[in-house]
Image (cartoon, rainbow, N blue to C red):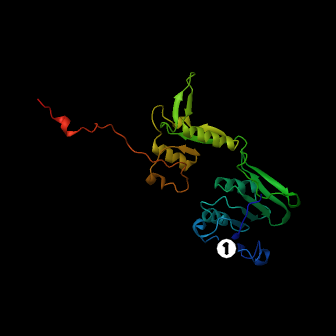
Amino acid sequence: MELPFRSILLLRNVKDADTCWTREDFDRNIPILNMNASHSLYLTKIFNSELLAVVCENRSEGDTIKALYRNLQDIRYTPTILVTQSNTTLSDLFEDCRSHKMLNVLALKDSDNKFVYSYRAFPHLQVVKRRVGHIRRYFEPQLRNMEGYQIKVLPDNVMPRTVVYRDARGRRQMTGYLAHLIRNFVSTLNATMHICWENVPEEETPNPTTVNKMLQDETVDFPLVLTTSNEYSEFSDHLVMEISSWFLMLPVEANTQRARLFLQD
């Protein structure tokens, strides 16, 4: 099934105002949002989610694609068509898209309307060239089969969430209910799980500063760690996997009737 859309985002640089398309190229019954590279809108909050982005990248020198990433913050799964120059190096363009979590991307070269270009993101980037007349589905699902791609996981060693131990051969292992959850998730995507053991202390939880640095450097995909709402707010581009509510329990003395505090002769 093709990705649906109810509206279109047209994005181009001022230099490309006279290229790529005209208003007559689009169905007048479909709402269109016209933007240029200088505009900045958080479309997640003000527009519907069934959006098709069409981007003119002919003479933008990278400004338009940066504007695309900025305006599609938190909705980068949006199906996107890039109209590029004939001399564009598509492998570099698609690598940039992948690094910005843009997986549903097609490219058209302005001088060639017979072929559509896309890419496979996993396990490594591959540019795909397809003849228009032979295409059954334009936007192929990237996450249905990741072909063994490594998903990096960081356990927090907090029972019963993730429990780190050593087996009979002395090798570190991970169990716990979050460990089972992430293993099933990885298996569903036909990926493999890589545990970042070098950042997991033997008997302690990972250092929060280390976890934050790994998130910023994108050296971990799923940090299975506890955090507070204040700490989480620093990373607005990450999603909460689990919300736990718990209370500290302390032993107390049993209730004693007053009469039992006095002895009768």
Q: Residue at x 67, y 74 (%)?
A: 34
Image quarter (top left, top right, bottom left or bottom right) of the N terminus: bottom right
Nearer to me, 30 or 252? 252
Going by the numbered disc 1, the residue's amino acid type is: Leu
| Residue 56 in view, yes or no | no
| Vertical order, 150 against 264 (above or below) | below
Left or right: residue 68 versus residue 155 is right
Q: Position of residue 39 (x, y in %)?
A: 60, 72
Nearer to me, 156 or 94? 156
Q: Residue at x 55, y 23 (%)?
A: 170
| Vertical order, 255 against 112 (above or below) | above
Left or right: residue 233 versus residue 36 is left
Q: Residue at x 45, y 48 (%)?
A: 245
Mark 1 = which residue? 33
| Vertical order, 65 against 159 (above or below) | below
Q: Quadrant of residue 186?
A: top right
Image quarter (top left, top right, bottom left or bottom right) of the C terminus: top left
Nearer to me, 92 or 255? 255
Q: Residue at x 65, y 65 (%)?
A: 49
Residue lying furthest left: 265
| Residue 183 in view, yes or no | yes
Residue lying furthest front: 265
